[in-house]
Amino acid sequence: MPAPLMQIETDAVVPAQADVVVIGGGIVGTCAAYYLAKRGVSVVLLEKGRIGAEQSSRNWGWCRQQNRDARELPISTRSLDLWDDLSAEIGMDPGFRRCGLLYLSNDEAEIAGWARWRDFARGEGVVTHMLSATEASERGHASGRKWAGGVFSPTDGTADPSRAAPVIALGVEKLGGRVVQNCAARGLELEAGAVSGVVTERGVIRTRTVVMAGGAWASSFVRQMGLRFPQASVRSSILSVAPGAELPDAVHTKYISITRRGDGGHTLAVSGAARVDVTPQQVRFWGKFLPMFFKRRKSLAPGGVQGWQSGHETLSRWALDRETPMERMRILDPRPDRSQIDLTLGRAREIFPALRDTPVAASWAGYIDSTPDGVPAIGETRIPGLVLAAGFSGHGFGIGPGAGHLIADLVTGTDPIVDPKPYHPARLDESVWGKVADF
């Protein structure tokens, strides 16, 4: 069963022109379109399948500052403020709550690492409470275990992955923007080397500005214009259980992480665990990703051929007047890794006894697209008018509002919400040894 997703009805007509076209209806694309529409920009949001149907509905739902890489902390903090406002602005609830995030551990080295991050974050104005053994065991009493220590980040929270992107897309329409589902963008038209239009399966949209926020599809798309964007994805498998268990809203241990869902059930996952499915793009960018794979070698495992068959990391070129890989695979919906699902459920039920009699509601997998250093690529490419926003490395859901706001800032030439330099795609031309983000 795929991840739960709120279905919305949107426009079926592709307009003849727009100030900006955003390609990709995940959390980043919807937020970019929302903040552009909020400024009165004529914007069209294109989604080849359903809004939010890929990784934006398949993640944990965490919106955190805790343990963020220093390059991402500013955009994380600003995103939380923006999450706070979305419900009132749109008139619908994306499921965001500042419930706080709880981290528990019996590993002294891990606890010491959290303390070092706390010391760094304190200088950035972020509140994090280190927990003693007694405090950690009390907050984690649902496990029935003693814990050596932990962290509680009270200003962090969660949003509902099944609702967030669809609700924000409805906000785009409320502000006068256009949202078109089941319509793939096949490529771009250029005049004098600059963007002049988007070719879709339903016709051409004249525009001078395009935001490519296509998630795992971004690299193969920009390759059609001769751009090289090092991107690779891993297949992550998680599950949800039915309501009934009394557990913290969001808790992480190195064995299992649990998040309360909007329906009262819980999402269960093992942090970092994923399969590396071989694809042409994996082979092409292998050298670029060696630092990443080396750092995450304990949590990654070899995968299969699903990624090759899905077509999202193809190196082939396609014609703009014929069916493309995006139309043949409207929604990336890979099979979950059954062994990972069984391991995750077993660990959850061992550590949190309340889950032993709670039935599984669904299990699913998703492709998490990453850059070589684990920090998103946000910025204009060498093609004038083409802005890239991809490679969010499993962090995109939480920082989606901040990323969308930053994209709108860059497009409209206003003061950026955060310093955009750490995210510029040009940095990926250099080696990332020693620069890979901690996850």
Image (tube, rainbow, N blue to C red):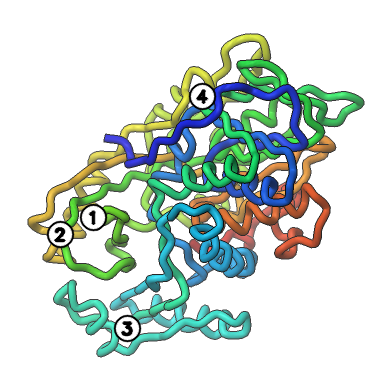
Mark carried by residue 265:
1
Residue type at the position of mark 2: Gly
Q: Between marks 4 and 3, how big is the CA–CA gap?
A: 48 Å
Total labels drawn: 4
Q: Which residue is mark 2?
A: 244
**Mark 1 burial class by Cα count in 10 Å: few <14, some 14-19, many 20+:** many
Q: Earlier in the sequence, mark 4 or mark 2?
A: 4
Q: Which residue is mark 4?
A: 182
Q: Is residue 50 above or below residue 387?
A: above
Q: Secondary structure at mark 2?
A: loop
Horizontal side of residue 437 vs 269, given as left or right: right
**Mark 3 burial class by Cα count in 10 Å: few <14, some 14-19, many 20+:** many
Q: Earlier in the sequence, mark 3 or mark 1?
A: 3
Q: Between marks 2 and 1, how big is the CA–CA gap?
A: 7 Å
Image coordinates for residue 222, horizontal then vertical, percent: 69, 31
Horizontal side of residue 303 vs 81, given as left or right: left
Q: Which residue is mark 3?
A: 149
Residue type at the position of mark 1: Gly
Q: Secondary structure at mark 1?
A: loop
Q: Earlier in the sequence, mark 4 or mark 3?
A: 3
Q: Is residue 336 above or below residue 430?
A: above
Q: Are marks 2 and 1 in contact (CB under 8 Å)?
A: yes
Q: Nearer the viewer, residue 42 or 115?
A: 42
Q: Are marks 4 and 2 in contact (CB under 8 Å)?
A: no
At 62% across and 35% down in the image, what residue appears? 45
Residue type at the position of mark 4: Asn
Residue type at the position of mark 3: Gly
Dividing the picture into quadrants, the one containing residue 209 is: top right
At 78% across and 22% down in the image, what residue appears? 189
